[in-house]
Image (cartoon, grey):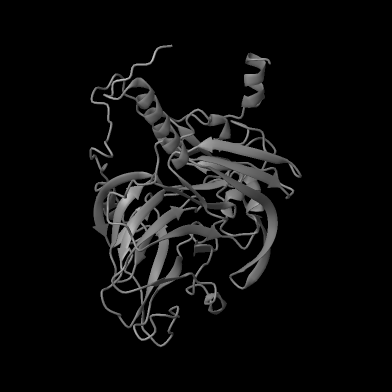
Amino acid sequence: MSMVISSGLPAPCSLLMATLMLLIVQAQSFTRHYNFNVQMANVTRLCATKSIVTVNGEYPGPALVAREGDRVVVRVTNHVAHNMTLHWHGVRQLRNGWADGTAYVTQCPIQTGQSYVYNFTVTGQRGTLWWHAHISWLRATVHGAIVVLPKHGVPYPFAAPHMEVPVILGEWWRADTEAVITRALHTGGPSDVSDAYTINGLPGPLYNDCCAKDTFKLKVEPGKTYMLRLINAALNNELFFSIANHTLTVVEVDAVYVKPFTVKTLIILPGQTTNVLLTAKPLYPKANFYMSAALYLGYQNPGTPIRPGYINNSTGAAILVYQKPSSPSTPSSFDKDLPLLKPALPRFNDTSYVANFTSKLRSLATPQHPAVVPRSIDKQFFFTVGTGTFPCPINTTCQGPINRTRFAASVNNVSFVLPSTALLDRVALLHPG
């Protein structure tokens, strides 16, 4: 092997410089270790307590923080009766696809009492992603944020915020979510809908009186800018998000910087992440402000009534609280005597608002963050994704939209049929040893 040294320094000096530079680069990348214990925990929401599956007893689960280029090692130990995998949603998994965490596709589930170590490197990404269970509906409570910071010395392509806050939008069921999905798969009908939307695991005060204490409060100082790392951890629902009397500047979506644009309300799909900048009002406003999350249902026809029990058309809420100028050295507290303002959210079927929002999404496309888009197209594909029905099997009762049918999702009118042999077993048969 030959080495070409192009600097004006003598070869030993150039080699020394190259070695030092390599050490500096390596020093900027770290291996970050996490221990995730999957365990049951009692949680009270909507005036009732139930036992849920969690990581480390937290709901939502702990945030995983790394920098671009870091290696992440997560030891997951399963202490519950359900088999379990964890998926690192949005991480590209370059050269470590085995760590993707999709049950029966890239790994067998972690059985009760067993451990599994995920080991992956975050390459060429920075921003907000999230992790969640990837088997059945356990992700309803088993999820958390992934915060990927830029490399040391690399700034954001916008002014650095005063503070960064993960904001996870989710759903809460009074029922056991595993029983809900099991029943839906058995009957072929729609699943029971959630009972509330949550913000950082809390439903907020709009559901009933005892929920007032179950409210996430974001405390801000006048004139400061905050970055909200929004994550939609709802199982199936697209959500509107807005803060009363404030605007949000979108700067990143799914760990990709975008050309900044400002809106009063944004739309965020299940599994999607969006970073927004919130600039607090310059002076103490003498008011509190709802942060609201509510359903967007794009396929509901205008004028068609909502079938009871078919969707969750409620509103999850948190509260934006300002630091009082008279007590800058003490934490702000929620003053119930101040007016509490609500945002005006779009209607649940306002497709024009959503289309206008999505049309504003553009890559940042700067020399530091180029948009590499192919300019020539070799082949074009057309996919139609939808939901149809199957005939109900003989001697079976089904609860689909038409008598004796069951729901069936499809791509180009073809539904997935479970194979008789698991994918991992097929791989083992094709490549023994």
For the C terminus, which image quadrant?
top right
Give the percent coordinates (x, y) of residue 428: 66, 19
Where residue 366 sits, quadrant-wise, is top left
Q: In this orientation, which residue lies closer to the viewer: 222 or 292?
A: 222
Give the residue displayed 34% in from the left and 83% down from the top: 325
Q: Residue furthest top?
A: 1
For the N terminus, which image quadrant?
top left
Give the percent coordinates (x, y) of residue 421: 66, 24
Give the residue displayed 49% in from the left and 75% down from the top: 205
Q: Is residue 55 above or below residue 288?
A: above
Image position of 158 (left or right of 231): left
The answer to whether residue 290 of the structure is visible from this angle is yes
Where residue 177 sits, quadrant-wise, is bottom right
The answer to whether residue 300 of the structure is visible from this angle is no
Q: In this orientation, which residue lies closer to the viewer: 413 or 123?
A: 123
Give the percent coordinates (x, y) of residue 259: 24, 47
Image position of 326 (left or right of 420): left
Image position of 421 (left or right of 403): right
Q: In this orientation, which residue lies closer to the viewer: 117 or 340?
A: 117
Give the percent coordinates (x, y) of residue 103: 62, 36
Give the residue displayed 36% in from the left and 83% down from the top: 339
